[in-house]
Image (cartoon, grey):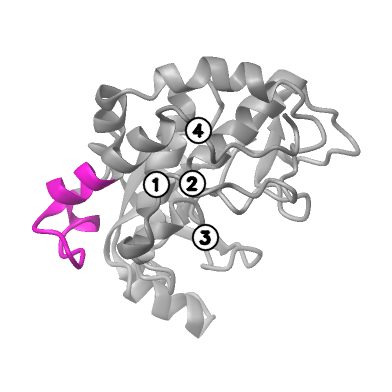
């Protein structure tokens, strides 16, 4: 279960994010980068963040801890930026908090040469989740305490914005992936990782998504049916033959 905290102070917006996430302090004395349900990209981004980050964690890839952050929109009443005020008003209730990693640096392949096993596992994982947002221009990786941490999975599982486009056999184009030059053990990653993608694992991960972020999804009866769709898609994608695997680093 992902813990629930209450926002106590809105610190600052992070304008480099397209959905205007913000740094928020909470009643557990933690500081979080909060992704707001009222942002233009909607609640499906929060769903993707939870499913992908928690799946990555269970595959041995580091991701910051997640919390559900309860937000009273009045917390931003003194925020001078009208855009931020409007966003907070539209995001009353439960939002997604990503643990803030103080002092973390953005990953730069010119400064840190990644281990080829890590690079291969990460590329395989991103191919599995259809993550189109891990390019050399925007790696969405942080270096913190000597380790590399995965962040920002909101653009993954993009098919859920229109479930009719969901195709678990869709090929993944890795030519722009930040790890493509280093992923020289992709076959070994493909030998290892699919065995971890079980129905039980996927059900445990999707169960972490709040029902309120899955309810009223067009084409589905209820939140349980949406969870089933994510499980079926990823389970099918992980099954052989995995023709979607990129060839760039094979």
Instruction: Write down the residue under mark 2.
Output: 32
Q: Looking at the image, do the residues carrying marks 3 and 1 touch, with CB atoms under 8 Å apart?
A: no
Label 3: how many residues lie within 10 Å, few (<14), some (14-19) or many (20+)? many
Residue 181 at x, y percent in the picture: 82, 36
Q: Position of residue 106 (x, y in %)?
A: 75, 44
* Label placed on residue 242: 4
Label 2, secondary structure: give it.
Answer: strand
Marks 4 and 3: which is nearer the front? 4
Q: Is residue 212 magenta?
A: yes
Q: Is residue 116 left or right of residue 75?
A: right
Please tell me which residue is depicted at 49% across the width and 84% down the height of the picture.
82
* Quadrant housing residue 248: top right
| Label 2, label 3: how far apart the Cα atoms are | 8 Å
Report the side of 65 relative to 152 (left or right): left
Q: Are marks 1 and 2 in contact (CB under 8 Å)?
A: yes
Question: Horizontal placement of 17 versus 158: left or right?
Answer: right
**For residue 26, which numbered disc appears in the image?**
1
Does residue 92 lie above or below 118 as drawn? below
Residue 125 visible:
yes
Q: Which residue, given by chain and number where applicable, does mark 3 sit on?
A: 22
| Viewer-proximal residue among 237 and 11 | 237
How far across and down, in percent of the image, does residue 10 sit? 47, 61
Label at residue 227? none
Compare marks 4 and 1 and give the one earlier in the sequence.
Answer: 1
Q: Earlier in the sequence, mark 2 or mark 3?
A: 3
Residue 109, by quadrant, is: top right
Depth order, front residue of 135/100 = 135
Check whether the beta carbons of the residues at disc 2 and disc 3 lie within 8 A of each other. Answer: no
């Amino acid at each position: 279960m992902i813990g629930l905290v209450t926002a106590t102070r809105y610190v600052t917006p992070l304008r480099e994010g397209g959905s205007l996430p913000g740094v928020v302090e909470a009643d557990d004395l933690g500081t979080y980068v909060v992704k707001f349900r009222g942002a233009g990209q909607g609640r499906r981004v929060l769903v993707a963040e939870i499913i992908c980050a928690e799946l990555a964690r269970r595959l041995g890839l580091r991701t910051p801890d997640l919390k559900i952050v309860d937000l009273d929109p009045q917390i931003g009443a003194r925020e001078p930026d009208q855009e931020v005020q409007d966003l907070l008003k539209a995001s009353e209730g439960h939002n997604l908090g990503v643990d803030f990693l103080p002092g973390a640096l953005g990953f730069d392949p010119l400064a840190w040469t990644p281990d080829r096993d890590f690079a291969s596992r990460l590329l395989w994982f991103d191919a599995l989740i259809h993550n189109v947002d891990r390019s050399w221009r925007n790696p969405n990786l942080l270096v913190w305490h000597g380790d590399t941490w995965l962040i920002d999975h909101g653009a993954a599982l993009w098919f859920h914005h229109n479930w009719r486009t969901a195709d678990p056999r869709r090929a993944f184009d890795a030519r722009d992936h930040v790890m493509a030059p280093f992923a020289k053990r992709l076959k070994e990653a493909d030998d290892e990782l699919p065995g971890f993608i079980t129905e039980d694992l996927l059900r445990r991960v999707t169960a972490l998504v709040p029902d309120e972020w899955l309810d009223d999804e067009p084409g589905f009866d209820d939140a349980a049916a949406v969870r089933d769709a994510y499980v079926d898609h990823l389970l099918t994608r992980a099954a052989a033959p995995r023709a979607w695997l990129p060839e760039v680093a094979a």
